[in-house]
Amino acid sequence: MLISRHRLYHDREEVVEAFRNGARIYVCGRSAIATAAKETCTKLYQEISDKSQEDSEAWFESIKSDRFAVDVFT
């Protein structure tokens, strides 16, 4: 498991609060880090909204172009 996933989830209360207040997520690094960050974001949304995995993924797709930016390499 990647550090980013651990850190985002560890600090989930602060991450959720910041996101509710308009924060954006910027990911730079390996493509696996961006994937892990996406998975963690959808997991957090699923936990706080009590939505299905499918709904959480649809939510992420709806916000990713505006609030989730990546600069990754392979």
Image: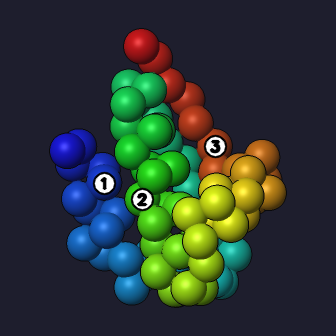
Question: Residue 19, relative to residue 42: is it above or below?
Answer: below
- If the image is split into quadrants, where does the N terminus sit? top left
Q: Position of residue 68 (x, y in %)?
A: 64, 51
Gap between marks 1 and 2 measured at Cα: 6 Å
Question: Residue 41, relative to residue 11: is it above or below?
Answer: above
Q: Which labelled disc corresponds to residue 69?
A: 3
Question: Residue 20, relative to residue 39: is it above or below?
Answer: below
Task: Tell me the crowding category of disc 1: few under 14, some 14 to 19, or many 20 or more residues within 10 angstroms, Cα based.
Answer: some
Amino acid under disc 2: Thr
Residue at point 69% right, 75% down? Answer: 22
For label 1, the SS is helix
**Nearest to viewer (mark 1 / mark 3):** 1
Q: Earlier in the sequence, mark 1 or mark 3?
A: 1
Please name the residue that numbered disc 1 is placed on: 5
Q: Is residue 38 left or right of residue 21?
A: left
Please name the residue that numbered disc 2 is placed on: 40
Q: Is residue 29 left or right of residue 56?
A: left
Question: Residue 61, relative to residue 50: is it above or below?
Answer: above
Q: Earlier in the sequence, mark 2 or mark 3?
A: 2
Along the line of sight, the residue nearer the viewer: 53 or 63: 53
Q: Is residue 54 left or right of residue 3?
A: right
For label 2, the SS is helix
